[in-house]
Image: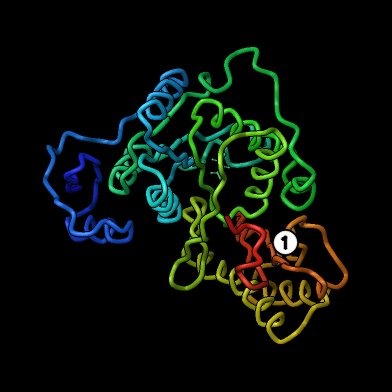
Amino acid sequence: MPTYLSLSDSSRWVALDESHARAMLERRGVANPQLALLPAAQRVEVVESGDNLRELVWECRRRGRTTGLVPTMGALHAGHLSLVETCLARNELAIATIFVNPTQFGPNEDLDRYPRTLDADLTALEAAGAAYCFVPSVDEMYPAGCTTAVAPPEVARRWEGECRPGHFAGVATIVLKLFHLAPTDDAYFGLKDYQQLLVIRHMARDLNVPITIHSCETVREPDGLALSSRNRYLSEGERQTALAVPSCLLAAQEAWTAGERDSRRLSNCMETTLREGGVSDIDYAVVVDAQTLEPLEDVGELRSAVAIVAARVGATRLIDNRVLSNPSTNADAD
Ligand code: PAF
């Protein structure tokens, strides 16, 4: 049961308990907060209509309150909640969205069985301190006759773009629609979906979206597996085998640190690690330019390279990545 706390300046945070609240506030630089219990009736407010969402964000803007957007497809885990936390470190109000976007799923993908856990998601968002959660219906986002879509930028062409035709058109379209409905100051996306992040950055730049895009580090299990809503599809045995995915990134990192700059050898090293770990259904396991995602013979001249991987463990498709450079030259630095 979350504890509700307020500050003397009437800002409001929701936390799991008082020590969690104090730690959150400390991270945000609030010294000696005057905490007071609020009635337990305060919950994250669910918004279902796009018009209401837009009005609400504009009202926040009129009152001079900064807002941040955290788009998700639900089935939330600690990775999503870290986006909310990063958002609240910069913005007064975090607005999450939960929408399993049909246009980014291919005909043989997992749209129907994609996990939908709205009640648990709202509890988690509340604990993380999100003020609002936009939960539209498919009809709200794609009313009958809605046929316009965003043509994704060049950086969408390879890798996920090749393996999942139409995926990035669906992502770019829904994210642009969310940006129009929620004209927040900032928006937050995870580095776990590295190519998606680049696609959204390029789309926002190319289409003059006045929202600052921020990236947040991938959150991992202690054994290295990146958190993903799809991890829940894995059986216990598959969960073990899935560790080959972060291991192949580590292998690339180690080879890179040892001075290897031949992208083919780096990619081979990733593939060998995957196969040795029992993963043979590999869509790609490559080291490419971190800015353009173009493959290169020799990555020695690059400011930064990124190891990217997509592979199936059983029926579950996992993706992950690791930037092979000094983080200060990272393509995704804010
Ligand atoms: O990363 C996701 O969860 C989705 O692709 C996003 C950005 C919410 C768009 O549907």
The residue positioned 75% from the left and 45% from the top of the image is 156
Give residue 116's position: percent from left, percent from top: 43, 39
Give residue 210's position: percent from left, percent from top: 59, 35
- Quadrant of image for the C terminus: bottom right
Left or right position of 296 against 58:
right
- Cβ of mark 1 under 8 Å from ligand 1: the answer is no
Three-letter amino acid code at the position of disc 1: Ala
Give residue 264's position: percent from left, percent from top: 83, 73
The residue positioned 46% from the left and 26% from the top of the image is 136
Q: Looking at the rendering, which quadrant does residue 64 occupy?
A: top left
The answer to whether residue 310 is seen in the rendering is yes
Front residue of 69/41: it is: 69
The vertical placement of 4 against 184, above or below, is below
Left or right position of 203 against 50:
right
Task: Please count the marks in the image.
Answer: 1
Mark 1: secondary structure: loop
Judged from the image, the quadrant occupied by ligand 1 is top right
Can you identify the residue that label 1 sits on? Answer: 290
Q: How is the image coloured?
A: rainbow
Front residue of 241/53: it is: 53
The vertical placement of 298 against 211, above or below, is below
